[in-house]
Image (cartoon, rainbow, N blue to C red):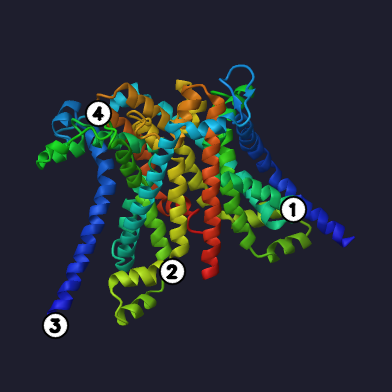
Amino acid sequence: MIAPHASRRVRLWLRHAVLILFAFLAFYPIVVMWITALRPSNEVMQNPFGLPTGIFLDNIVNAWVKGRFGNYFINSVIITVPTVIGVVVLSALAGYGIARFRFRGRMLIFYTMLLGLTIPFQSVMIPLYYQLLAMGLLGSYLAVILPSIAFGLPFGIFLMQSFFEDLPHELTEAARVDGCSEFRIFRSVMLPLARPAISTLIVFQFMRTWNEFLMPLLYLQDEARRPIPLGLMFFQGAYTRDIGLIAAGVSLSTIPVIIVYLIFQRQFVKGLTAGAVK
Amino acid sequence: MATSRIAARQRAGFWFVLPAFLIYLVFFGVPFVATIWLSFTEWNGVGQPAFTGAGNYLRLSGDTAMWAALGNNVIWVVIGTVVPVFIGLIIAVMLWSDARGSMTYRTIYFLPVVLSPVVIGIIWGWIYNPLFGLLNTSLRAVGFGNFAIGWLGESETALYAVLVTAIWSYLGFCIVVLFAGLQKVDPELVGAARIDGANARQRFRHVIVPQIRPVLTMVIVYTVIGGFNVFDVVWVMTSGGPNNASEVIATYTYEIAFRGNEYGYGATLSMVMSVLSLIAAWITMRMRASDEGAR
Protein backbone atom coordinates (compact mmCIF):
# COMPACT_ATOMS: atom_id res chain seq x y z
CA MET A 1 0.00 0.00 0.00
CA ILE A 2 2.89 2.35 0.68
CA ALA A 3 4.76 1.56 -2.51
CA PRO A 4 2.68 3.54 -5.08
CA HIS A 5 2.74 6.56 -2.83
CA ALA A 6 6.51 6.41 -2.39
CA SER A 7 7.13 5.89 -6.09
CA ARG A 8 5.01 8.91 -6.89
CA ARG A 9 7.14 10.98 -4.55
CA VAL A 10 10.33 9.63 -6.12
CA ARG A 11 8.98 10.54 -9.54
CA LEU A 12 8.20 14.04 -8.32
CA TRP A 13 11.72 14.51 -7.02
CA LEU A 14 13.20 13.08 -10.18
CA ARG A 15 11.16 15.47 -12.25
CA HIS A 16 12.35 18.46 -10.27
CA ALA A 17 15.93 17.21 -10.47
CA VAL A 18 15.68 17.26 -14.26
CA LEU A 19 14.03 20.70 -14.26
CA ILE A 20 16.73 22.10 -11.97
CA LEU A 21 19.50 20.56 -14.07
CA PHE A 22 18.20 22.36 -17.16
CA ALA A 23 17.75 25.59 -15.22
CA PHE A 24 21.39 25.29 -14.19
CA LEU A 25 22.49 24.64 -17.78
CA ALA A 26 20.62 27.73 -18.95
CA PHE A 27 21.80 30.01 -16.19
CA TYR A 28 25.33 28.95 -15.29
CA PRO A 29 27.11 30.00 -18.54
CA ILE A 30 25.75 33.53 -18.02
CA VAL A 31 26.56 33.68 -14.32
CA VAL A 32 30.07 32.33 -14.78
CA MET A 33 30.80 35.35 -16.99
CA TRP A 34 29.66 37.73 -14.25
CA ILE A 35 31.84 35.90 -11.73
CA THR A 36 34.82 35.87 -14.09
CA ALA A 37 34.46 39.62 -14.58
CA LEU A 38 35.11 40.08 -10.86
CA ARG A 39 38.35 38.05 -10.83
CA PRO A 40 41.88 38.80 -12.09
CA SER A 41 42.57 36.97 -15.37
CA ASN A 42 45.56 34.99 -14.04
CA GLU A 43 43.38 33.52 -11.27
CA VAL A 44 40.73 32.58 -13.82
CA MET A 45 43.34 30.77 -15.93
CA GLN A 46 44.27 28.60 -12.95
CA ASN A 47 40.71 27.73 -11.99
CA PRO A 48 37.89 28.86 -14.26
CA PHE A 49 35.27 27.64 -11.77
CA GLY A 50 36.65 29.64 -8.82
CA LEU A 51 34.79 32.38 -7.00
CA PRO A 52 36.02 35.97 -6.46
CA THR A 53 38.39 36.15 -3.48
CA GLY A 54 37.94 39.86 -2.84
CA ILE A 55 36.53 43.00 -4.31
CA PHE A 56 38.19 43.31 -7.71
CA LEU A 57 36.65 45.84 -10.09
CA ASP A 58 39.63 46.51 -12.41
CA ASN A 59 38.10 44.51 -15.27
CA ILE A 60 34.82 46.37 -15.15
CA VAL A 61 36.54 49.77 -14.98
CA ASN A 62 38.97 48.88 -17.77
CA ALA A 63 36.24 47.51 -20.00
CA TRP A 64 34.12 50.61 -19.44
CA VAL A 65 37.04 52.94 -20.27
CA LYS A 66 38.92 51.01 -22.98
CA GLY A 67 35.86 49.34 -24.43
CA ARG A 68 33.80 52.54 -24.40
CA PHE A 69 30.69 50.61 -23.48
CA GLY A 70 28.96 53.82 -22.44
CA ASN A 71 29.35 54.94 -26.02
CA TYR A 72 28.02 51.69 -27.48
CA PHE A 73 25.07 51.82 -25.15
CA ILE A 74 24.10 55.30 -26.36
CA ASN A 75 24.50 54.15 -29.97
CA SER A 76 22.22 51.19 -29.36
CA VAL A 77 19.60 53.51 -27.87
CA ILE A 78 19.92 55.96 -30.80
CA ILE A 79 19.32 53.11 -33.24
CA THR A 80 16.69 51.15 -31.33
CA VAL A 81 14.29 53.88 -30.16
CA PRO A 82 13.49 55.40 -33.58
CA THR A 83 13.29 51.92 -35.14
CA VAL A 84 10.76 50.71 -32.58
CA ILE A 85 8.70 53.91 -32.86
CA GLY A 86 8.80 53.71 -36.66
CA VAL A 87 7.74 50.08 -36.79
CA VAL A 88 4.94 50.52 -34.24
CA VAL A 89 3.45 53.67 -35.77
CA LEU A 90 3.64 52.48 -39.38
CA SER A 91 2.43 48.96 -38.54
CA ALA A 92 -0.52 50.23 -36.52
CA LEU A 93 -1.58 52.53 -39.37
CA ALA A 94 -1.11 49.95 -42.10
CA GLY A 95 -2.52 47.05 -40.09
CA TYR A 96 -5.62 49.14 -39.42
CA GLY A 97 -5.91 50.16 -43.05
CA ILE A 98 -5.76 46.58 -44.26
CA ALA A 99 -8.05 45.17 -41.58
CA ARG A 100 -10.81 47.80 -41.71
CA PHE A 101 -11.07 49.05 -45.29
CA ARG A 102 -11.72 47.36 -48.61
CA PHE A 103 -9.76 49.38 -51.14
CA ARG A 104 -8.40 48.20 -54.46
CA GLY A 105 -4.97 46.52 -54.32
CA ARG A 106 -5.36 45.87 -50.61
CA MET A 107 -4.61 42.14 -50.77
CA LEU A 108 -1.79 42.66 -53.25
CA ILE A 109 -0.11 45.08 -50.84
CA PHE A 110 -0.74 42.76 -47.90
CA TYR A 111 0.78 39.72 -49.58
CA THR A 112 3.72 41.71 -50.92
CA MET A 113 4.46 42.76 -47.39
CA LEU A 114 4.04 39.26 -45.98
CA LEU A 115 6.75 38.16 -48.40
CA GLY A 116 9.12 40.06 -46.14
CA LEU A 117 8.34 37.61 -43.33
CA THR A 118 10.12 34.81 -45.14
CA ILE A 119 12.87 36.51 -47.16
CA PRO A 120 16.08 36.75 -45.09
CA PHE A 121 18.08 39.96 -44.83
CA GLN A 122 20.92 38.32 -46.79
CA SER A 123 18.70 38.44 -49.86
CA VAL A 124 18.87 42.22 -50.01
CA MET A 125 22.15 43.02 -48.26
CA ILE A 126 24.33 43.49 -51.35
CA PRO A 127 22.24 45.95 -53.41
CA LEU A 128 21.10 47.68 -50.23
CA TYR A 129 24.73 48.51 -49.45
CA TYR A 130 25.10 50.35 -52.76
CA GLN A 131 21.68 51.90 -52.48
CA LEU A 132 22.53 53.38 -49.07
CA LEU A 133 25.82 54.58 -50.49
CA ALA A 134 24.02 56.31 -53.36
CA MET A 135 21.53 57.87 -50.94
CA GLY A 136 24.39 59.22 -48.86
CA LEU A 137 23.21 57.27 -45.81
CA LEU A 138 25.94 54.61 -45.56
CA GLY A 139 27.75 54.87 -42.23
CA SER A 140 25.04 56.98 -40.60
CA TYR A 141 22.59 55.73 -37.98
CA LEU A 142 19.84 55.97 -40.59
CA ALA A 143 21.60 53.26 -42.64
CA VAL A 144 20.55 50.81 -39.94
CA ILE A 145 17.35 52.50 -38.72
CA LEU A 146 15.50 52.71 -42.05
CA PRO A 147 16.19 49.12 -43.24
CA SER A 148 15.41 47.86 -39.71
CA ILE A 149 12.03 49.56 -39.91
CA ALA A 150 11.40 48.05 -43.35
CA PHE A 151 12.28 44.57 -42.05
CA GLY A 152 10.17 45.01 -38.92
CA LEU A 153 7.05 46.03 -40.86
CA PRO A 154 5.96 42.62 -42.23
CA PHE A 155 5.62 41.08 -38.77
CA GLY A 156 4.26 44.31 -37.28
CA ILE A 157 1.55 44.66 -39.91
CA PHE A 158 0.68 40.98 -39.68
CA LEU A 159 0.26 41.33 -35.90
CA MET A 160 -1.70 44.59 -35.95
CA GLN A 161 -3.88 43.53 -38.88
CA SER A 162 -5.04 40.37 -37.15
CA PHE A 163 -5.69 42.33 -33.94
CA PHE A 164 -7.73 45.10 -35.58
CA GLU A 165 -9.69 42.60 -37.61
CA ASP A 166 -11.05 41.03 -34.42
CA LEU A 167 -12.31 44.31 -32.90
CA PRO A 168 -16.10 44.85 -33.11
CA HIS A 169 -17.39 47.16 -35.86
CA GLU A 170 -20.06 48.81 -33.72
CA LEU A 171 -17.57 51.19 -32.12
CA THR A 172 -16.33 52.66 -35.38
CA GLU A 173 -19.85 52.86 -36.81
CA ALA A 174 -21.00 54.94 -33.82
CA ALA A 175 -18.05 57.31 -34.19
CA ARG A 176 -18.73 57.59 -37.92
CA VAL A 177 -22.36 58.53 -37.31
CA ASP A 178 -21.07 61.23 -34.97
CA GLY A 179 -19.11 62.63 -37.92
CA CYS A 180 -15.56 61.76 -36.83
CA SER A 181 -12.91 61.69 -39.55
CA GLU A 182 -11.38 58.29 -40.35
CA PHE A 183 -8.09 59.32 -38.76
CA ARG A 184 -9.84 60.56 -35.60
CA ILE A 185 -11.63 57.22 -35.32
CA PHE A 186 -8.34 55.39 -35.61
CA ARG A 187 -6.50 57.70 -33.23
CA SER A 188 -9.12 58.10 -30.48
CA VAL A 189 -11.25 54.95 -30.69
CA MET A 190 -9.25 52.07 -32.13
CA LEU A 191 -5.65 52.78 -31.16
CA PRO A 192 -6.28 52.84 -27.39
CA LEU A 193 -7.88 49.40 -27.69
CA ALA A 194 -4.80 48.01 -29.43
CA ARG A 195 -2.55 48.50 -26.42
CA PRO A 196 -1.89 44.77 -25.80
CA ALA A 197 -0.82 44.16 -29.40
CA ILE A 198 1.30 47.31 -29.38
CA SER A 199 3.19 46.35 -26.22
CA THR A 200 3.87 42.91 -27.71
CA LEU A 201 5.20 44.54 -30.86
CA ILE A 202 7.36 47.01 -28.90
CA VAL A 203 9.13 44.23 -27.00
CA PHE A 204 9.57 42.05 -30.08
CA GLN A 205 11.03 44.87 -32.15
CA PHE A 206 13.15 46.18 -29.28
CA MET A 207 14.88 42.82 -28.82
CA ARG A 208 15.34 42.33 -32.52
CA THR A 209 16.94 45.74 -33.09
CA TRP A 210 18.92 45.78 -29.84
CA ASN A 211 20.62 42.47 -30.76
CA GLU A 212 20.92 43.16 -34.50
CA PHE A 213 24.39 42.25 -35.72
CA LEU A 214 24.80 41.82 -39.48
CA MET A 215 23.14 45.09 -40.50
CA PRO A 216 25.43 47.37 -38.43
CA LEU A 217 28.39 45.16 -39.35
CA LEU A 218 27.78 46.01 -43.01
CA TYR A 219 26.40 49.54 -42.92
CA LEU A 220 27.85 51.16 -39.78
CA GLN A 221 31.58 50.76 -40.07
CA ASP A 222 32.44 53.96 -38.20
CA GLU A 223 33.80 52.91 -34.81
CA ALA A 224 32.12 55.82 -33.01
CA ARG A 225 28.66 54.66 -34.11
CA ARG A 226 28.84 50.97 -33.23
CA PRO A 227 25.96 49.52 -31.24
CA ILE A 228 26.63 47.11 -28.34
CA PRO A 229 26.81 43.75 -30.18
CA LEU A 230 29.23 45.10 -32.77
CA GLY A 231 31.31 47.00 -30.20
CA LEU A 232 31.51 43.88 -28.07
CA MET A 233 32.69 41.78 -30.99
CA PHE A 234 35.52 44.14 -31.86
CA PHE A 235 36.37 44.50 -28.17
CA GLN A 236 36.66 40.74 -27.91
CA GLY A 237 38.87 40.63 -31.00
CA ALA A 238 41.22 43.20 -29.51
CA TYR A 239 41.66 41.57 -26.08
CA THR A 240 41.36 37.86 -26.91
CA ARG A 241 43.83 36.83 -24.22
CA ASP A 242 42.35 38.80 -21.35
CA ILE A 243 39.35 36.72 -20.31
CA GLY A 244 38.60 38.86 -17.25
CA LEU A 245 38.30 41.94 -19.41
CA ILE A 246 36.16 40.18 -22.02
CA ALA A 247 33.91 38.80 -19.28
CA ALA A 248 33.52 42.35 -17.98
CA GLY A 249 32.47 43.48 -21.47
CA VAL A 250 29.98 40.63 -21.70
CA SER A 251 28.59 41.48 -18.25
CA LEU A 252 28.21 45.15 -19.12
CA SER A 253 26.19 44.22 -22.19
CA THR A 254 24.07 41.44 -20.65
CA ILE A 255 23.07 42.93 -17.30
CA PRO A 256 20.91 45.80 -18.67
CA VAL A 257 19.01 43.45 -21.00
CA ILE A 258 18.46 40.89 -18.25
CA ILE A 259 17.18 43.54 -15.83
CA VAL A 260 14.74 44.82 -18.45
CA TYR A 261 13.71 41.22 -19.16
CA LEU A 262 13.04 40.44 -15.50
CA ILE A 263 10.89 43.58 -15.12
CA PHE A 264 8.83 43.10 -18.29
CA GLN A 265 8.94 39.32 -18.31
CA ARG A 266 5.37 38.72 -19.36
CA GLN A 267 5.59 41.12 -22.29
CA PHE A 268 8.92 39.58 -23.31
CA VAL A 269 7.65 36.05 -23.47
CA LYS A 270 4.49 37.18 -25.23
CA GLY A 271 6.40 39.42 -27.61
CA LEU A 272 9.10 36.95 -28.56
CA THR A 273 6.76 34.02 -28.97
CA ALA A 274 3.95 36.01 -30.64
CA GLY A 275 4.78 34.67 -34.08
CA ALA A 276 4.68 31.06 -32.97
CA VAL A 277 1.57 31.01 -30.75
CA LYS A 278 -1.06 32.52 -32.95
CA MET B 1 -24.93 58.20 -54.02
CA ALA B 2 -24.56 56.02 -50.96
CA THR B 3 -22.38 53.47 -52.71
CA SER B 4 -19.92 56.08 -53.97
CA ARG B 5 -19.62 57.51 -50.47
CA ILE B 6 -18.85 54.03 -49.12
CA ALA B 7 -16.28 53.51 -51.89
CA ALA B 8 -14.68 56.84 -51.00
CA ARG B 9 -14.52 55.80 -47.37
CA GLN B 10 -12.94 52.47 -48.28
CA ARG B 11 -10.28 54.28 -50.27
CA ALA B 12 -9.19 56.04 -47.07
CA GLY B 13 -7.60 52.71 -46.09
CA PHE B 14 -5.01 53.25 -48.80
CA TRP B 15 -3.67 56.34 -47.04
CA PHE B 16 -3.24 54.38 -43.83
CA VAL B 17 -1.16 51.78 -45.63
CA LEU B 18 0.85 54.09 -47.87
CA PRO B 19 3.65 55.27 -45.49
CA ALA B 20 4.52 51.72 -44.44
CA PHE B 21 4.34 50.47 -48.01
CA LEU B 22 6.71 53.19 -49.26
CA ILE B 23 9.38 52.49 -46.63
CA TYR B 24 9.03 48.79 -47.31
CA LEU B 25 9.36 49.25 -51.07
CA VAL B 26 12.41 51.50 -50.85
CA PHE B 27 14.40 49.49 -48.30
CA PHE B 28 13.20 45.98 -49.06
CA GLY B 29 11.39 45.76 -52.39
CA VAL B 30 13.89 47.68 -54.52
CA PRO B 31 17.02 45.93 -53.18
CA PHE B 32 15.29 42.54 -53.45
CA VAL B 33 14.49 43.09 -57.12
CA ALA B 34 18.06 44.36 -57.56
CA THR B 35 19.36 41.12 -56.03
CA ILE B 36 17.40 39.10 -58.57
CA TRP B 37 18.86 41.16 -61.39
CA LEU B 38 22.38 41.15 -59.92
CA SER B 39 22.28 37.36 -59.63
CA PHE B 40 22.46 37.20 -63.46
CA THR B 41 25.56 39.38 -63.64
CA GLU B 42 29.22 39.49 -62.81
CA TRP B 43 30.26 42.49 -60.76
CA ASN B 44 33.18 43.40 -58.49
CA GLY B 45 31.54 46.55 -57.12
CA VAL B 46 33.24 48.93 -59.54
CA GLY B 47 31.75 50.09 -62.83
CA GLN B 48 28.79 48.39 -64.45
CA PRO B 49 27.68 44.80 -63.71
CA ALA B 50 28.20 42.56 -66.75
CA PHE B 51 25.20 40.46 -67.73
CA THR B 52 26.13 36.78 -67.84
CA GLY B 53 22.72 35.13 -68.18
CA ALA B 54 22.39 31.90 -66.27
CA GLY B 55 26.17 31.70 -65.78
CA ASN B 56 26.07 32.13 -62.00
CA TYR B 57 23.33 29.56 -61.62
CA LEU B 58 25.33 27.06 -63.68
CA ARG B 59 28.33 27.80 -61.48
CA LEU B 60 26.27 26.79 -58.42
CA SER B 61 26.09 23.16 -59.51
CA GLY B 62 29.87 22.80 -59.62
CA ASP B 63 30.57 24.87 -56.50
CA THR B 64 31.62 22.19 -54.03
CA ALA B 65 32.17 24.74 -51.23
CA MET B 66 28.55 25.85 -51.64
CA TRP B 67 27.25 22.27 -51.48
CA ALA B 68 29.39 21.58 -48.41
CA ALA B 69 27.96 24.69 -46.73
CA LEU B 70 24.43 23.68 -47.69
CA GLY B 71 25.13 20.20 -46.30
CA ASN B 72 26.08 21.84 -43.01
CA ASN B 73 22.80 23.75 -43.07
CA VAL B 74 20.95 20.45 -43.51
CA ILE B 75 22.80 18.96 -40.51
CA TRP B 76 21.97 22.13 -38.61
CA VAL B 77 18.30 22.01 -39.54
CA VAL B 78 17.90 18.32 -38.61
CA ILE B 79 19.81 18.27 -35.30
CA GLY B 80 18.82 21.85 -34.44
CA THR B 81 15.16 20.85 -34.79
CA VAL B 82 14.97 17.31 -33.44
CA VAL B 83 17.04 17.87 -30.27
CA PRO B 84 15.44 21.07 -28.91
CA VAL B 85 11.91 20.02 -29.88
CA PHE B 86 12.36 16.64 -28.21
CA ILE B 87 13.95 18.01 -25.02
CA GLY B 88 11.62 21.01 -25.09
CA LEU B 89 8.54 18.77 -25.23
CA ILE B 90 9.71 16.66 -22.30
CA ILE B 91 10.51 19.70 -20.16
CA ALA B 92 7.29 21.46 -21.14
CA VAL B 93 5.20 18.42 -20.23
CA MET B 94 7.06 18.11 -16.90
CA LEU B 95 6.29 21.76 -16.13
CA TRP B 96 2.71 21.32 -17.21
CA SER B 97 1.99 18.20 -15.17
CA ASP B 98 3.49 19.70 -12.01
CA ALA B 99 2.82 23.42 -11.86
CA ARG B 100 4.92 24.10 -8.75
CA GLY B 101 7.59 26.69 -9.53
CA SER B 102 6.73 26.52 -13.23
CA MET B 103 6.93 30.30 -13.61
CA THR B 104 10.41 30.46 -12.06
CA TYR B 105 11.68 27.63 -14.25
CA ARG B 106 10.32 29.28 -17.37
CA THR B 107 11.89 32.62 -16.42
CA ILE B 108 15.29 30.96 -16.19
CA TYR B 109 14.93 28.79 -19.30
CA PHE B 110 14.00 31.84 -21.34
CA LEU B 111 17.04 33.91 -20.24
CA PRO B 112 19.38 32.91 -23.09
CA VAL B 113 16.68 33.86 -25.61
CA VAL B 114 17.05 37.57 -24.80
CA LEU B 115 20.84 37.64 -25.25
CA SER B 116 22.49 38.80 -28.46
CA PRO B 117 24.20 36.13 -30.58
CA VAL B 118 27.49 37.97 -30.08
CA VAL B 119 27.25 37.59 -26.30
CA ILE B 120 26.26 33.94 -26.69
CA GLY B 121 29.15 33.29 -29.06
CA ILE B 122 31.68 34.86 -26.70
CA ILE B 123 30.37 33.00 -23.64
CA TRP B 124 30.56 29.65 -25.41
CA GLY B 125 33.88 30.49 -27.04
CA TRP B 126 35.19 30.72 -23.50
CA ILE B 127 33.52 27.45 -22.44
CA TYR B 128 35.20 25.73 -25.41
CA ASN B 129 38.61 27.38 -24.85
CA PRO B 130 41.11 24.52 -25.34
CA LEU B 131 43.38 25.42 -22.41
CA PHE B 132 41.34 27.24 -19.79
CA GLY B 133 37.74 26.65 -20.88
CA LEU B 134 35.14 25.20 -18.56
CA LEU B 135 34.54 22.14 -20.73
CA ASN B 136 38.14 20.96 -20.96
CA THR B 137 38.91 21.84 -17.35
CA SER B 138 35.98 19.65 -16.30
CA LEU B 139 37.03 16.83 -18.62
CA ARG B 140 40.56 16.84 -17.18
CA ALA B 141 39.23 16.93 -13.64
CA VAL B 142 37.26 13.73 -14.15
CA GLY B 143 40.08 11.97 -15.97
CA PHE B 144 38.96 12.42 -19.56
CA GLY B 145 41.90 14.67 -20.45
CA ASN B 146 42.31 12.82 -23.75
CA PHE B 147 39.01 14.24 -24.93
CA ALA B 148 40.01 17.80 -24.04
CA ILE B 149 40.42 19.10 -27.60
CA GLY B 150 40.07 22.51 -29.23
CA TRP B 151 36.38 22.13 -29.94
CA LEU B 152 36.09 25.12 -32.24
CA GLY B 153 39.49 24.59 -33.85
CA GLU B 154 39.03 21.01 -35.04
CA SER B 155 37.28 20.33 -38.36
CA GLU B 156 35.42 17.34 -36.91
CA THR B 157 33.84 19.19 -34.00
CA ALA B 158 33.58 22.89 -34.97
CA LEU B 159 30.13 22.72 -36.58
CA TYR B 160 28.65 20.65 -33.75
CA ALA B 161 30.20 22.84 -31.07
CA VAL B 162 28.54 25.91 -32.61
CA LEU B 163 25.28 24.00 -33.07
CA VAL B 164 25.22 23.03 -29.37
CA THR B 165 25.64 26.72 -28.57
CA ALA B 166 22.75 27.65 -30.83
CA ILE B 167 20.51 24.97 -29.33
CA TRP B 168 21.36 26.31 -25.86
CA SER B 169 20.29 29.76 -27.00
CA TYR B 170 16.81 28.81 -28.23
CA LEU B 171 15.85 25.74 -26.21
CA GLY B 172 14.09 28.07 -23.74
CA PHE B 173 12.06 29.50 -26.61
CA CYS B 174 10.91 25.99 -27.60
CA ILE B 175 10.02 25.12 -24.00
CA VAL B 176 7.98 28.28 -23.44
CA VAL B 177 6.10 28.04 -26.74
CA LEU B 178 5.33 24.35 -26.26
CA PHE B 179 4.26 25.04 -22.67
CA ALA B 180 1.86 27.70 -23.96
CA GLY B 181 0.49 25.13 -26.40
CA LEU B 182 -0.03 22.63 -23.59
CA GLN B 183 -2.37 25.04 -21.82
CA LYS B 184 -4.97 24.07 -24.42
CA VAL B 185 -4.68 20.36 -23.69
CA ASP B 186 -7.59 18.92 -21.75
CA PRO B 187 -6.21 17.23 -18.58
CA GLU B 188 -9.36 15.14 -18.30
CA LEU B 189 -8.57 13.49 -21.60
CA VAL B 190 -5.12 12.58 -20.31
CA GLY B 191 -6.66 11.26 -17.10
CA ALA B 192 -9.17 9.20 -19.07
CA ALA B 193 -6.35 7.67 -21.11
CA ARG B 194 -4.54 6.80 -17.87
CA ILE B 195 -7.65 5.02 -16.57
CA ASP B 196 -7.92 3.18 -19.87
CA GLY B 197 -4.45 1.81 -19.18
CA ALA B 198 -2.30 3.98 -21.45
CA ASN B 199 1.23 4.32 -20.08
CA ALA B 200 3.10 7.65 -19.91
CA ARG B 201 4.64 7.23 -23.35
CA GLN B 202 1.36 6.31 -24.98
CA ARG B 203 -0.43 9.20 -23.28
CA PHE B 204 2.26 11.56 -24.53
CA ARG B 205 2.29 10.20 -28.05
CA HIS B 206 -1.43 9.68 -28.65
CA VAL B 207 -3.19 12.14 -26.37
CA ILE B 208 -0.93 15.15 -25.78
CA VAL B 209 1.01 15.49 -29.05
CA PRO B 210 -2.06 15.47 -31.35
CA GLN B 211 -3.62 18.27 -29.30
CA ILE B 212 -0.58 20.57 -29.62
CA ARG B 213 0.10 19.82 -33.29
CA PRO B 214 -0.37 23.44 -34.49
CA VAL B 215 2.11 24.82 -31.92
CA LEU B 216 4.52 21.99 -32.61
CA THR B 217 4.38 22.82 -36.30
CA MET B 218 5.17 26.47 -35.60
CA VAL B 219 8.20 25.61 -33.45
CA ILE B 220 9.53 23.30 -36.14
CA VAL B 221 9.04 25.95 -38.79
CA TYR B 222 10.93 28.42 -36.61
CA THR B 223 13.90 26.10 -36.13
CA VAL B 224 13.95 25.01 -39.78
CA ILE B 225 13.91 28.54 -41.21
CA GLY B 226 16.40 29.62 -38.53
CA GLY B 227 18.65 26.71 -39.50
CA PHE B 228 18.75 27.68 -43.16
CA ASN B 229 19.39 31.36 -42.40
CA VAL B 230 21.81 31.06 -39.47
CA PHE B 231 24.65 33.57 -39.61
CA ASP B 232 25.43 35.52 -36.42
CA VAL B 233 26.50 32.81 -34.00
CA VAL B 234 28.59 30.98 -36.61
CA TRP B 235 30.25 34.19 -37.71
CA VAL B 236 31.15 35.20 -34.16
CA MET B 237 32.45 31.78 -33.09
CA THR B 238 34.27 30.33 -36.11
CA SER B 239 33.57 32.55 -39.15
CA GLY B 240 32.89 29.26 -40.93
CA GLY B 241 36.31 27.77 -40.14
CA PRO B 242 38.54 25.90 -39.67
CA ASN B 243 38.98 25.19 -43.38
CA ASN B 244 35.29 25.87 -44.02
CA ALA B 245 34.34 23.01 -41.69
CA SER B 246 31.53 25.02 -40.08
CA GLU B 247 30.65 27.05 -43.17
CA VAL B 248 26.92 27.59 -43.73
CA ILE B 249 25.24 29.17 -46.73
CA ALA B 250 24.91 32.59 -45.03
CA THR B 251 28.58 32.85 -44.02
CA TYR B 252 29.64 31.59 -47.44
CA THR B 253 27.48 34.24 -49.12
CA TYR B 254 29.01 36.92 -46.92
CA GLU B 255 32.54 35.79 -47.79
CA ILE B 256 31.94 35.55 -51.53
CA ALA B 257 30.31 38.99 -51.62
CA PHE B 258 32.18 41.11 -49.11
CA ARG B 259 35.55 39.33 -48.87
CA GLY B 260 35.87 38.13 -52.45
CA ASN B 261 34.09 41.15 -53.98
CA GLU B 262 32.03 38.85 -56.18
CA TYR B 263 28.76 40.69 -55.85
CA GLY B 264 27.04 39.01 -58.79
CA TYR B 265 27.67 35.48 -57.56
CA GLY B 266 27.00 36.63 -53.99
CA ALA B 267 23.55 37.76 -55.15
CA THR B 268 23.00 34.32 -56.71
CA LEU B 269 23.81 32.71 -53.36
CA SER B 270 21.37 35.15 -51.72
CA MET B 271 18.75 33.87 -54.11
CA VAL B 272 19.47 30.30 -53.01
CA MET B 273 18.69 31.43 -49.45
CA SER B 274 15.48 33.18 -50.57
CA VAL B 275 14.28 30.12 -52.46
CA LEU B 276 14.98 27.83 -49.50
CA SER B 277 13.03 30.18 -47.21
CA LEU B 278 10.13 30.41 -49.63
CA ILE B 279 9.96 26.63 -49.93
CA ALA B 280 9.97 26.36 -46.13
CA ALA B 281 7.20 28.97 -45.91
CA TRP B 282 5.14 27.20 -48.55
CA ILE B 283 5.43 23.86 -46.74
CA THR B 284 4.45 25.64 -43.51
CA MET B 285 1.30 27.04 -45.03
CA ARG B 286 0.37 23.60 -46.34
CA MET B 287 0.98 22.04 -42.91
CA ARG B 288 -1.01 24.76 -41.16
CA ALA B 289 -3.89 24.29 -43.56
CA SER B 290 -3.92 20.54 -42.85
CA ASP B 291 -3.67 21.19 -39.08
CA GLU B 292 -6.68 23.45 -39.28
CA GLY B 293 -8.53 20.96 -41.43
CA ALA B 294 -7.87 18.23 -38.85
CA ARG B 295 -9.34 20.21 -35.99
Circles 4 and 3, Cβ within 8 Å, touching? The answer is no
Amino acid of disc 4 = Ile
The Cα atoms of the two marked residues, 4 and 3, are separated by 58 Å
Amino acid of disc 3 = Met
Q: Left or right: where does residue A182 sit relative to residue A117?
A: right
For label 3, the residue is: A1
Say if A106 sits above or below A166 in the image. Answer: above
| Secondary structure type for disc 1 | helix
For label 2, the residue is: B211
Amino acid of disc 1 = Glu
Circles 2 and 1, Cβ within 8 Å, touching? The answer is no
| 10 Å crowding of disc 2: few (<14), some (14-19), many (20+) | some
First reached walking from the N terminus: tag 1 or tag 3: 3
| Secondary structure type for disc 3 | loop
| 10 Å crowding of disc 3: few (<14), some (14-19), many (20+) | few
| Secondary structure type for disc 2 | helix
The chain holding disc 2 is: B
The Cα atoms of the two marked residues, 2 and 1, are separated by 42 Å
For label 4, the residue is: A243
The Cα atoms of the two marked residues, 4 and 2, are separated by 48 Å
Amino acid of disc 2 = Gln
Circles 4 and 2, Cβ within 8 Å, touching? The answer is no
Q: Are marks 3 and 2 on the same chain?
A: no
